[in-house]
Amino acid sequence: MIDLGPTPDAMVSRRRFCIELRRVRMDAGLTQREVAEALEWSPAKLLRIENGQVGISRIDLLALLDHYGVDDPERQRHFLALARRSKKQVWTTYRDVLNLDFINYLGYEGAASVIRQFELTFVPGLLQTEEYARALIQGLSTPGEKRKVDRQVQARMARQEIIHRPDPPRMFFMLDEAVVHRWVGAGSSDATIMRRQLQQLAELDATPHIDIHVIPFSSGVHLGMMGSFVILEFPDPVDDDLLFIENGRKALVTREDRSEIERYKGMFWGFETAVRQRPIGEVLDRILRDIA
């Protein structure tokens, strides 16, 4: 298993590094052109560094910090650590089986302090048992792709390590009732896979940092029927919330469209209000009795 640890992934570290580097330059009252001329760099070099398009060497970073008057050793170590982490690509080891949009998303997910997810079709990846994940991935794959299935299952299980961190994110999951009724692995001789998955949902819901609710069929038509989505929030105020929407082949990741993110947040909060009095345990107990 990959040890993700509590450290932000490369993408989040790179974004934070760029924001903080621009901030110290602006605090020093300097423009990009002034800095570039003083260090005998091309203006394009500093622009690409501040935009996260290229990395920066230790020597160049220390030269920048010295020019900005950042001489405190602790702050220098902070910048050096951010620059180092920004080069570490944890999830790219799975680029043979995961698309780039999802790899980028996983980098953000690993640094989130709050995860809100609505799922319309199947149990969210963070909550899946290994058996359920394998049956689901196999069912959506072309026959004969055993290695690809094995790699995707491995990635999914590694992703779940954030649940067991000393400081895990706060997680809220809203599941359409179809999720807990749709049998995954139904081709097996019994309902073992689905039973274990439902039992795991109940166990996870009992942990302090995870809340799982089911939107009942009796709610009728609701906005979530347009598709699943995830909203991530981050502990650092310089990091904007992120909206992730995936439809299998393509994905939307946005932090810039604030009105769209707020619209989806409002939708999620509406779900929370609607199901507040319906604990998932009651739903799962009934279904487990039916498949016993």
Image: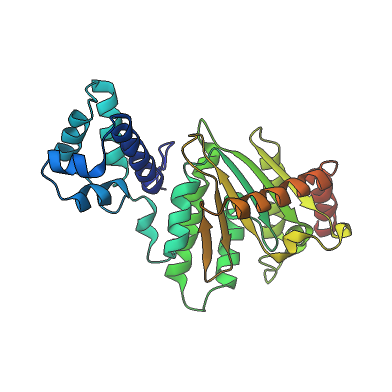
The location of residue 57, given as percent across then percent down, is 18, 43
Q: Residue at x 51, y 55 (%)?
A: 156
In the image, is residue 99 above or below residue 80?
A: below
Q: Residue at x 14, y 43 (%)?
A: 37
The location of residue 72, given as percent across then percent down, is 25, 20
In the image, is residue 201 above or below residue 251?
A: above
Q: Nearer the viewer, residue 209 or 202?
A: 209
In the image, is residue 197 above or below residue 62?
A: below
Residue at the farthest bottom position: 143
Q: Nearer the viewer, residue 243 or 90?
A: 243
Instruction: Tell me if 188 is positioned left or right of 74 in this view.
Output: right
Q: Residue at x 51, y 30 (%)?
A: 166
Q: Quadrant of the C terminus?
A: bottom right
Q: Give the number of callouts.
A: 0
The location of residue 241, given as percent across then percent down, is 54, 45
Colouring style:
rainbow
Instruction: Tell me if 200 is positioned left or right of 56 in this view.
Output: right
Tell me, yes or no, if residue 183 can be seen here.
no
Q: Residue at x 85, y 58 (%)?
A: 290
Residue at the farthest left position: 40
The location of residue 106, given as percent across then percent down, is 47, 52
Tell me, yes or no, if residue 280 can be seen here.
yes
